[in-house]
Image (tube, rainbow, N blue to C red):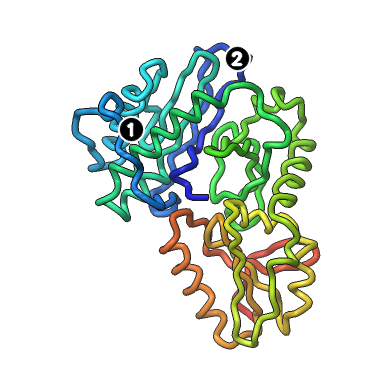
Amino acid sequence: MPLLARAVLFGLVGLASACGTHGGVPAAAPTSTAPTAAASAAPPELEPQGKPASTFDSSDELHFTETCARILRDLDPTMGVEVAQPLALSIRTSSRQLGLNLHRVWSYCARNAGDCESATLGYLERTVDEVATRFGPPEMTQVRAVIREETYPGAVADPLVAGLWVLYAVDTPHAAQILTTSQLEELGLDAERLRAIARENVLKDLGPLAEHVQILPDDGIGYIQTGNYYVSSYLLDVSAWKIVADQMRGRLLVAAPTRDMVVYADSASPRIDQVLPSILKDFMRRSSIPLSDVVLVWSTEGWSVWDGGP
């Protein structure tokens, strides 16, 4: 699902908390790794009362963030919106305080300057819609275990491997809200139960890995991209990858260059140490939601970083 149709919101305090209580906000990621999604089409023109009259300023991270804050205030004057830091906004409503991370849409703008204003306006308009409709405790059926290249202050997070993290999100049609420790009480869960339910939910959504893999030729590289935003979460199902590993002459290599794609290959393939990193970088460059170019090696115990050998 295209990211610009999904606001990425971070709950800073629970619904039961006082609105004036401030929690941490997600740190802005370096723009070189911050993913975003290309808009599939230019968003519809906003109504005159919704589109700010002043200049759209994307000259640097801070001015872009201030511009987004102003647009959100214009779109919904009932929301309190403040700049927490470059590429991070604090949003206060009558019942909750949230953080909005802008580093993905900023990264999109850096690569698509001509579409920046239109895409940003559409993204922020959908964010306002999501904030207006998503109040009430999250449901357990909505939680997903997701792979990310960074964690955030207060987030429930577990290291996976090589700088990749498992975070836990509440999935809705328009947004993925990263869960914080303060929100576990709303779900009635402890961290261990959250992990189990979130993993079960996302793997059920994705379906059996075996349905998406194929036997590779000697020099082949396979990939899984089903249209599901969370395909990279297949990395969580370590045991399911055995059927793929059994096909390999060497070791099974796996990478998640984007959030919605997993790539796999045989370490015994010719020139794989040159070809695979190049392909991963190309996938990341062309994707609106890049994740990681780290190549992992499968074993029954889990993932480790590939040393480049056969």
**Does residue 257 lie above or below 189 as drawn?**
below
Asked whether, in this view, residue 277 is left or right of residue 309, the answer is left
Q: Is residue 200 left or right of residue 294?
A: right
Between tags 1 and 2, which lies in front? 1
Nearer to the camera, 132 or 99: 132
Badge 1, how many Cα within 10 Å: few under 14, some, many 20+? many
**Which of the labelled discs sits on residue 159, or is there none?**
none
Q: Residue at x 49, y 73 (%)?
A: 279
Q: Quadrant of residue 253?
A: bottom right
Residue drawn at x 71%, y 77% as measured from the top left: 251
- Residue 167 coordinates in the image, percent (x, y): 63, 43
Where is the C terminus found, in terms of image quarters?
bottom right
Circle 2 crowding by C-alpha within 10 Å: few under 14, some 14–19, many from 20: some
**Helix, strand, or loop for circle 2?**
loop
User: For the residue marked with disc 2, what is the amino acid?
Assistant: Ser
- Amino acid type of disc 1? Cys
Task: Using the image, determine if residue 127 lies above or below residue 36.
Answer: above
- Across and down, in percent, residue 25 comes to 49, 30
Are the residues tagged 1 and 2 within 8 Å (C-beta)? no
Which residue in the structure is indicated by mark 2?
17
- Please name the residue that numbered disc 1 is placed on: 68
Q: Which residue is more in the foreground, 29 or 105?
A: 105
| Rendered residue at 66%/79% (across/down) | 266
